[in-house]
Image: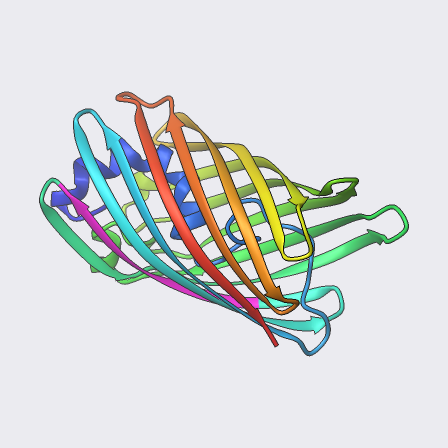
Amino acid sequence: MRHPLFKTSRFLFSAASLAALAAFSGSSLALQPLITDDTGTQGSGRHQFEASYNRERARAGGETERTRSVPVVYTYGVTESLDLFAGIDHSSIRASGDRASGFGNTVIGAKWRFFENEAAGFSLALKPEIAIPVGARCEDDGLGTGKVSGNLTFILSQDVPFGSLHVNAGVGRDRYRHADNNATNRHLSIAPVWEVSERWKLALDAGIDWSRSGGGTVRSRFAEIGAIYSPSEDLEFAVGYIRATDDDKPKSTTHGLTLGVTWRF
């Protein structure tokens, strides 16, 4: 539950923002700039650093909430098929003329590619994540959850003639000091990625999220278009635009833009 100045906005925008925040404000970045992740890992002893700048605007019932966030994530390859990662984001929220800013939950997790058929270009992975609680003031400002929360995502990747196809299915639990705000979340998404040239990739991403809280379920849908430019094998720049809507009352719509960089070493 946010500070009273954000109380109305929190419930108006929770559903539509769920999909957008997964890409823009979450500490565990996926395949930038997408929400949907792939099964790729760093390899034994390899490192990866990701950062992005994200802007989001959500509207519902005549009110507008604007969010800017800067998430950063560090990943280390423990083995050829297992990564460990940790990340955090700093966000600034403005609604109805009031503002709040601060750090969100620190997220730690892993990605384990437990099956791979190289000949068929097919692989499967699991991605568990744990969100470390934020302080009471940050929770009241809507910047994170005040109790340990978590997510588990199942990932499928398949090589196709034009590039690759990725599918995610996930479940999660957001836990707050105010138990009435606790939410159970489900996620399903798919992302085709086109390898346009050696340096350029174009992608689409679409999915649906369900958030159950207080005895009711709100469903949100999102769609994203993105581009990835790779000047070298270990450096990528990404840009994406996302739109999300929900079936809450009043209905809310979220628009967002993300700019990101990924560096492997």
Residue 243 at x, y percent in the picture: 40, 34
Q: Which residue appears farthest toward the left when viewing the image?
A: 97
Q: Is residue 8 left or right of residue 183?
A: left
> How many labels, in total?
0
* In-front residue for pair 215/26: 26
Q: Is residue 114 left or right of residue 110?
A: right
> What's the colour scheme?
rainbow
**Image quarter (top left, top right, bottom left or bottom right) of the C terminus:** bottom right
Which residue is depicted at the point 23% across and 44% down?
66
On screen, residue 102 versus residue 72, left or right, reads left
The quadrant in which the N terminus is found is top left
Expressed as whole percent of the image width and height from the top left, the position of residue 194 reads: 66, 43
Question: Image point 81% across, 53% down: which residue?
Answer: 115
**259 lies above or below 166:** below
Asked whether residue 112 is in view, the answer is yes
Q: Nearer the viewer, residue 16 or 174?
A: 16
Res 41 quadrant in image: bottom right
Q: Is residue 91 magenta?
A: yes
Q: Is residue 221 above or below residue 180?
A: above
Of 262 and 198, which appears nearest the observer? Answer: 198
The image shows residue 98, relative to residue 252, as above or below, that is below
Image coordinates of residue 186 in percent, x first then y, are 52, 36
Q: Residue 76: image x %, image y %?
A: 61, 73
Q: Residue at x 36, y 42 (%)?
A: 256
Q: Quadrant of residue 184?
A: top left
Q: Residue at x 79, y 40 (%)?
A: 161
Residue range of the region highlighted in magenta in the rendering: 85-95
